[in-house]
Image (spheres, helix red, strand yellow):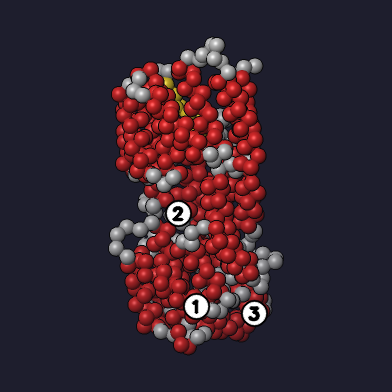
Amino acid sequence: MSCPAVAEELIALADSLPADEARAPALLAVSILENHLYTRREQPLPPSLLFSLELRIAQVLFRHTGEVATVESMLGSLSNKLGNYEEFVLLRIEVNALLAQLMQQAGQSRAAVKVLEHSASLAAERHLTHLQYTALLQIHQITRNAAILRTLASMALQNGHSDFARYVRVLTQLDRAQHGLPTDTSAFVAPSQGQAFTLLDLVSLMTQITTDMTMGECATALPRLSSLHAQLDSKPWPASQTIIVGPNQSLTLSWLSKPQGFALVSLLSAHVHLADMTSHRAARFLQDGLQQLPHIRDPSWRDQMQVAIWTTQVIDAIVRQQFVQADALLIQIGQGSRITPLHQYLHASLLQAQGRLQEALGTFLSLAQGVQLPGPRPAADTAVSVMSGLSAVLILRSNVVPALYNPSEATLLLNSLRPHCTASPLQACLGLVTAADPSHQREQPLDVRKILTSLMSQAARLCSTDLKCLALTLLASPQRNQTDPPAAKRQFAQAAYSLASRPAGELSRWSLWHGLGWARILEEGGALEHAAQQHAMNERIRGALLQQGQLALTPWL
C-alpha cells in the first residue's frame, strides 16, 4: 500500500473519532504525507500532485489540529505557487474553499465571501457547474442571503438538475421557517419508499418538522417525527449524497456526522414533546442528545448544541418546578456563552416561579420593550419580547404583591402586544392571558367562552397537555364560563381532573401556572360527583387564579 493510501486510511480513522482522540491519527497522516513529499528528491512529483498533497495536509491540519497559523502560512505559499495557471484552476478553487473557512473562523466573513465569489466566477467561466453550485452554497452558509438560494434555484431549473433543485427548495423553506415566515409545504417530498434513506430525504423530513414546530403545528410534526425515527432505526445515517449535475460532474452534498445528526434529532424530538407534561419523553431525548456530544469533533458546533440542550432542559425544569436544576443550568450557560434574550426570559421566569415577582417584573418589562424597536428583528427575539410582555401583564394584574398591582398599565401593555400575536403559538398565549382577565370575563362572557374553546383547539395543535388542562379548568369555573350549564361544567372538570391525574409522579409539580399544582387542587376537589363539591373546587381554583397571576409560557417558544 502506498504512503498516500495509508495516510488516507488514518485520515478516515480521525474523521470517525471524537475531537480529543482524532488529533493523534491525523498528525500521523500528516507526517506520512510530508515524508512522501520531501523524500522523493530523485523522482520529483508532478506539480499538480505535489500541490494536491500540500492542500491535503492543510485540510487535515485545519480539521483536526486547530493549527490555524500553520494552515494560513501553507495556503499563502500554495496560492503563490498556483498563480493564475489554467491547469491549476481546480486546485485554486479548492484552496479558496479552505481559505474561506479559515477567514470565516477568524470573523472575516466579507473577505471569505469575496474569495468564494472568485471561485464561483472561475467555475462559471469554465462551465464547472458543480463547483459553481458549491461556492454559492458556501456563500449562502455565511450570509444567509435568500437571493443566493433564488439564484441557485433558477440555475438548477434551467439546467434540469431536479435533485439539486429539491435540495435548494428545502433550504429555502428552512430559512423561511427560521425567520418565522410562511412556508410552502409543497416543496417537501416524502422519503423514498423501499429505497435508501438519502440525505435529501433526511433534510427534507427534518425541515418539515422544524417548520411544523415554528408554526405551532406540533400535532402535525408528531407523525413525521415517528417516521424520522423509524427511518434512522432501520437504515444507515446518510451523511452525504452524490448528485449528478452534468457530464462527468457531480456534487457531493454532505451534512452532519452521525453524532451531530443524532444530537440534532434528539433536540428536535425533545421540542416536539416538550409541552406534553404527561410524559418524560422530552427529558429522555435531551439526555440522549447530551450523550452524543463527546463524539462530536467540531468544538464550536458541539458547544452550540450543548447550550441549546441545556436551554431546553431549563424550560422543562421550570415548568416541572425543578427550580434548583433550572438555576444550575442557567449558571452553566452564563459561564460559557453569550446570554441571549431567551436566557434572560428564562431567568425571569425562574424568579417568577420562586415568587420573586418584583425582580422578574423588571426583566420582563425590559425585554418587552423589544417589540417597539425599529427595523426587522429575528423572529425568536420578537417572540421572547412578546412572551415577556404577557408575563409582565399577569404580574401587574396580580395582587400577590400589592405594590406591583397596576391593571391600567397591564391593559396598555397587552394592547401593544396584540399585533404581534396573530399566529400560533403566541396567539394561544394571548388568549390564555385574555381569558384570565377578571374584567374581560365580566364584560364579555361570550368572548371568553369563545377564547377558551379556541384554546382547546390550539392545545391539540400544540400537543400541550397543560394548556388543555387549564382551558378545561377555566371552562369548568362559573366565574370564567358564564354561558354553559352546570352539567357541562362538571364534564369539563372531570376531563381536567382525568388529564391532570394521568402522570403518576407529577401530581404535585405538574402545572402551567408556577406555584399552583392544578392536579393537586383538582384531586382535592373529590370525585366531582356532587355539585357542592364541584362549586367548592371551582371557588378554590378561582381564588388561586386571581392570587397567583404567574403563567409559564415557555413550552411554546
Name the spot of residue 535 as percent of width and height, x first: 58, 83
Furthest toward the front, the residue is 41
Q: Tell me where residue 438 sits by quadrant.
A: bottom left
Q: Residue at x 65, y 49 (%)?
A: 291
Residue flagged by tag 3: what amino acid is it?
Gly
Query: Which numbered dot is residue 408?
Result: none
Dot 1 or dot 2, earlier in sequence = 2
Mark 3 or 1: the one toward you: 1
Say which element carries label 1.
Answer: helix
Mark 3 or 2: the one toward you: 2
Q: Provide the residue designation for mark 1.
A: 359
Name the spot of residue 118 as percent of width and height, x first: 33, 32
Whether residue 110 can be seen here: yes
Dot 3 or dot 1, earlier in sequence = 1
Residue contact between numbered discs 3 and 2, judged by CB atoms under 8 Å: no
Left or right: 178 with respect to 281?
left
Query: Which numbered dot is residue 214?
Result: 2
Left or right: 556 with respect to 374?
right
Q: Provide the residue designation for mark 3.
A: 525
Q: Tell me where residue 92 sits by quadrant.
A: top left
Left or right: 140 with respect to 12?
left
Would you place residue 252 above or below residue 368 in this image?
A: above
Residue contact between numbered discs 3 and 1, judged by CB atoms under 8 Å: no
